[in-house]
């Protein structure tokens, strides 16, 4: 069926983020509207009532509206916003500390993410929310994460959960990740693109989605190997994560993916999960990539798009409901 337009306020939306059961849009004047499931307050409008139309996100404590928002990111049952001052505010479900305010109490209005009992996370330039955790990239090129951590997806060399405040991601027991330029969160794993165009991932790895040629969970940021299984994947200019898989866009315009492949979401012509990167078809002119739960897509230089993976609901976009393990034109 044809796409339907959603009217958000009376101004243009500059960014949209779809979570597990809610969607949020950043408006051009720095506020946000959300709609969908709201049992845990993830719409941020000081209620727990579902809404099929957009509602404005309230301010802290329900007073006024959250403003000066620079980015919004929706998780499964929680939502976070980065404001222009470099602080982060979250709302919704909080049983795993995913609001980052040192509690496990749900909140239907925004609360500020902390790094200590009386200190707050600052200097943030980008955020990404997974199922029950969120990660933030700082101007210092470091990464902080908080929330559910049973698989090490917070990256602080523990599996302590909940992580109720933001903690710094490590590369080892004695060193922190210091050269990140992009961060992305999958369902229960996280990845960072580095300044040298390599990638490090951490967290749940049963399907190989960390990309280090193993299937052991990782609680520190671990280098993604090259397709050969040794060395490192190089030339990466973009990353995105699905539920149990990860994809990278290379400067050559090619796309490499790793992790769960039961539905063909890695695009290598098979349904075999991979713990190291494999090339998605013969794509050589991709501009951007996006990973869904069990499918992946790339926008190409010629203005077309290709998708691959699960197709039961038509998400591959090729006029069928069949899975496809190789990229097809939408």
Image (cartoon, rainbow, N blue to C red):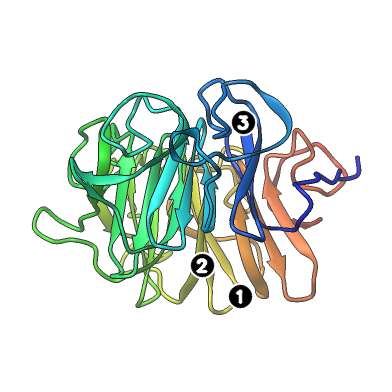
Q: Which mark is residue 21?
A: 3
Give whichever of discs 1 and 3 has the lower sequence position.
3
Residue with the mark numbered 2: 238
Residues tagged 1 and 2 counted as in contact (Cβ below 8 A): no
In three-dimensional space, the C-alpha distance between marks 1 and 2, rounded to whole angstroms, equals: 10 Å
Q: Position of residue 70 (x, y in %)?
A: 52, 60
Left or right, 168 with reference to 100: left
Of 141 and 277, nearer the camera is: 141
Secondary structure found at label 2: strand
Q: Secondary structure at mark 1?
A: loop
Identity of the residue drawn at 65% across and 74% down: 284
On the image, numbered disc 1 is attached to which residue?
A: 253
Q: CA distance from mark 2 to mark 3?
A: 26 Å
Could you tell whether 61 is left or right of 306 in the image?
left
Q: Nearer the viewer, residue 84 or 152?
A: 84
Residue sticking out furthest to the front: 63
Q: Nearer the viewer, residue 201 or 41?
A: 41
Earlier residue among tags 2 and 3 = 3
Task: Relative to 134, say whether 257 is above or below.
Answer: below
Pinpoint residue 325: horizontal percent, then vertical percent.
66, 48
């Amino acid at each position: 069926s044809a796409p339907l337009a959603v009217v958000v306020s009376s101004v243009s939306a500059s960014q949209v983020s779809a979570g597990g059961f809610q969607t949020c849009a950043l408006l051009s004047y720095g506020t946000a509207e959300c709609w969908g499931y709201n049992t845990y307050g993830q719409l941020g409008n000081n209620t727990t009532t579902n809404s099929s139309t957009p509602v404005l996100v309230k301010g802290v404590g329900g007073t006024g509206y959250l403003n000066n928002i620079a980015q919004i990111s929706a998780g499964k049952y929680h939502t976070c916003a980065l404001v222009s001052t470099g602080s982060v505010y979250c709302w919704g479900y909080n049983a795993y500390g995913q609001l980052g305010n040192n509690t496990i109490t749900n909140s239907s209005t925004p609360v500020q993410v902390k790094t200590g009992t009386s200190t707050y996370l600052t200097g943030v330039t980008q955020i990404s929310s997974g199922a029950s955790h969120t990660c933030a990239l700082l101007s210092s090129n470091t990464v902080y994460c908080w929330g559910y951590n049973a698989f090490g997806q917070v990256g602080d060399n523990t599996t302590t959960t909940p992580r109720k405040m933001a903690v710094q991601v490590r590369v080892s027991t004695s060193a922190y990740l210091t050269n990140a330029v992009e961060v992305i969160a999958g369902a229960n794993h996280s990845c960072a693109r580095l300044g040298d165009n390599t990638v490090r991932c951490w967290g749940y790895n049963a399907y190989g989605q960390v990309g280090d040629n193993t299937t052991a969970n990782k609680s520190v940021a671990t280098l993604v190997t090259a397709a050969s299984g040794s060395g490192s994947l190089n030339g990466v200019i973009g990353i995105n994560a699905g539920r149990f898989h990860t994809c990278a866009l290379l400067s050559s315009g090619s796309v490499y993916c790793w992790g769960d492949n039961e539905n063909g979401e890695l695009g290598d012509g098979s349904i075999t999960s991979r713990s190291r990167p494999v090339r998605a078809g013969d794509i050589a002119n991709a501009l951007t990539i996006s990973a869904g739960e069990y499918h992946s897509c790339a926008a190409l230089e010629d203005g077309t798009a290709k998708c691959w993976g699960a197709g039961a609901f038509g998400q591959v976009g090729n006029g069928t409901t069949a899975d496809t393990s190789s990229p097809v034109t939408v």
